[in-house]
Image (cartoon, coloured by chain):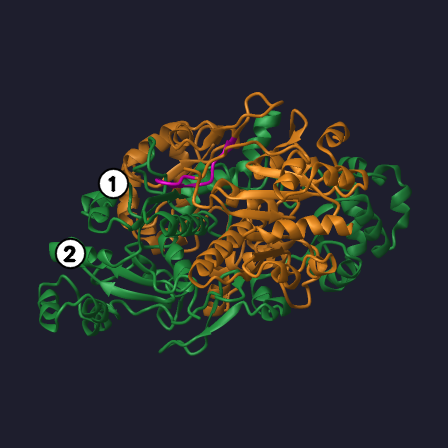
Chain colours: A orange, B green
Amino acid sequence: MTGPLAGMRVVDVTTNISGPTLTMILADLGAEIIKIERPGTGDDARGMGPFMSGEGVYFLHINRNKESVVIDLKKQDGKQIVYDLVESADVFVENFRQGKAEQMGLGYAKLKAINNQIIYCSLSAYGQSGPQKLQPGYDAIAQAETGIMGINGAKDAELARVPVSILDQGSAMWGVIGILSALLHRKHTGEGQFVSTSLYETGLFWSSYHMLSFLATGEEPQKNGSGHTAFAPYGAYLASDTYIMIGISNQSLFERLCRVLNSMEWLSDQRFRDNKNRVENQYILKEKIELILQRETADYWVTELSAAGIPSSKVKKISEVIDAKQTEALDMWEQVTHDTIEDLRLPRLPFQLSKSTPKVKTASPKLGENTDYVLQSLGYTQERIAELSSSQVIAPYEKELKNR
Amino acid sequence: MTGPLAGMRVVDVTTNISGPTLTMILADLGAEIIKIERPGTGDDARGMGPFMSGEGVYFLHINRNKESVVIDLKKQDGKQIVYDLVESADVFVENFRQGKAEQMGLGYAKLKAINNQIIYCSLSAYGQSGPQKLQPGYDAIAQAETGIMGINGAKDAELARVPVSILDQGSAMWGVIGILSALLHRKHTGEGQFVSTSLYETGLFWSSYHMLSFLATGEEPQKNGSGHTAFAPYGAYLASDTYIMIGISNQSLFERLCRVLNSMEWLSDQRFRDNKNRVENQYILKEKIELILQRETADYWVTELSAAGIPSSKVKKISEVIDAKQTEALDMWEQVTHDTIEDLRLPRLPFQLSKSTPKVKTASPKLGENTDYVLQSLGYTQERIAELSSSQVIAPYEKELKNR
């Protein structure tokens, strides 16, 4: 079994995070990804730390299962290689600024003229139209632009971005959903099409609930820490060593909480008798809860709370998550062979398919590792490859290795 | 054009946020979603505020384009309706706790025996195996469990969950990617399969970069506010009225910033001459930047910064995002006809397909609105429908309306 996209060829001219994350998902699903990189430095993400044996960890993660082909796209012979690749490809993905692909001769109209069935995906910062379409944008900037940063964090605390790249990775996921949809459309109709997504559209969609709430109430959404506007007790509570996240969303759960904390008297306390009163008196209740929690460790309480069926978790450190028993039981890490990193493991995609499960098969490629192989597979002769190499349209793999 | 999933039938027994978000994506892509709800109250999300004309805004958003069928799944005749639906369905989606679908007679083995080609998707809190597989979990709890909450927010600030539901909605997106992959697999092989995802797996995957960084360096990832560990100036800076997010990731951008702020002398200042020095002296630099920014509004500065090609954005309020020019230019809002809400608009999915674009066609259904229609389409006679209604296996639509 080689995955549901086995036999698909993707030409990938993306760099940095969002685009390569998109094609990594396609790669794990079995597609062949031909990652085109510029001579010399290649994808900027190769230089992003921290590093394992000189390899950037983010690059390692999001470029697994790909082939690296070094081409100078400014040269006509370089463009021609892409055109030749596109002839036999199913999907083309770019994350240039709006309009740049056209300038480079790699726009949709051009590639469609070469292969009418191509599915062309454009992943940009601000989308295909509008006053900001030409602006550059990173995940953090787009978080500010789409209202997410403004509501993130504890009340009165300094601003903070969401610390995982929900726009880079989120837009990558939407791009994949678009491409898979377009592949299904092509199965039925034989037609290719243009797929587009962006960090901005993704950010707006993450904010849907807050935007609709504003439209319903006219109240500006605010930073709310770990709490919940509608429920109490709900949030992070301090035990003797660290915090526990507890979510009490109905009366039955509150009764169970009172039992675990040996505080049945709260049930007859007017201040806590129902959710409405608990929300009003949440700070008094919090103090009382923490007074009890501080007698034992977070691990102790989470065991007790979970046994009582109360949704709760220790607020874990990243290092605690990596080798948690649940992480291990779900086989979240895949061991990957790498020539210089001894014990390389990477997380699998967060879903499983019983018959065609996504796999990490190979580590991220060295810059230009597959240039020769891919050109040969296009029918380029050794002579022609040598020519292209001496005119610096492509760069031979050995040379790149020295330059790294 | 009715979308790439036109003609697909999805039987949906999910409730709350994650599962219904998953099937909403399939619905926008053109699939027919038969949403099965319990008599009386239906999906719990119907009761989640805030409300527009009595309809919960989150429910309105994530249940558009669906058909509501009220069935009591505890009754054998109720289960039989699901079996009949599954016979002609392509996809079945559930988000029960692990093992509950089997107990209810709705497990994969049972449904596969009815329809060998069915794609069965299970979306749970903690996944299909492991010590926590039976635990309940919400988005916020799973954020604590997977390390995200622990690194969110400003340094030294109180804990905060990520304020958009990146695990509910994220797992929904992964579920969709899994289902679309399985549909492609079925096109090639004729085989159905079991697709699974969870909040926990999704949370781990969001944390990939931080987990790999820890494995590379041994340093525990920390809360980092709006800043960046590797670059300066980078973060939220205060103008006269509100904050601006600025991201300076290379020397050329820093030079442009100095020009816009009329502070070319920073370029020859030893403390700021390169990124390394700027990171070391970032708080001094921040003070200097804010001293200048406070002379004008955020809007003024963002116009200037953008004109100079510097990645930046005002840290916007949610209310500012809704009708931003860029939001409008991208047609992010779709006007939806609703019988009691006059001006209902909902955000479209954050990607576009040139030939089969996702659409919001109908508002979320009233509880049981489509029960009769769907049963008739299965060949149930009016007599049989009346029988099922009087034995309370189903609930007629009129009665439900009164109960709402």
Task: Tell me, for residue B80, which label it has, or none.
Answer: 2
Q: Amino acid at mark 1?
A: Gly
Q: CA distance from mark 1 to mark 2?
A: 20 Å
Of A333 and A41, the residue lying toward us = A41
Residue B119: image location, x then y, percent: 32, 50
**How packed is label 2: few (under 14 Cα within 10 Å), some, or many (20 or more)?**
few
Of A395 and A161, the residue lying toward us = A395
Of A40 and A189, the residue lying toward us = A189
Q: Is residue A162 visible?
A: no
Which segment did they paint magenta?
Answer: A346-357
| 1 and 2 marks in contact (CB < 8 Å) | no
A386 displayed left or right of B337: right
Q: Secondary structure at mark 1?
A: loop
Which residue is painted at 61% across and 36% down in the image?
Answer: A58
- Image quarter hosting the C terminus of chain B: bottom left
Q: Secondary structure at mark 2?
A: helix
Task: Tell me, for residue A40, which label it has, or none.
Answer: none
Task: Tell me, for residue B99, which label it has, or none.
Answer: 1
Q: Amino acid at mark 2?
A: Gln
Q: Is residue B180 above or below residue B67?
A: above
Q: Is residue A349 magenta?
A: yes
Label 2 is found on which chain of the structure?
Answer: B
**How packed is label 1: few (under 14 Cα within 10 Å), some, or many (20 or more)?**
few
A312 displayed left or right of A96: left
Residue B101: image location, x then y, percent: 24, 46
Mark 1 vs 2, N-terminal side? 2
- Image quarter hosting the N terminus of chain B: bottom left
Label 1 is found on which chain of the structure?
Answer: B
B333 displayed left or right of B310: left
Residue B319: image location, x then y, percent: 56, 66
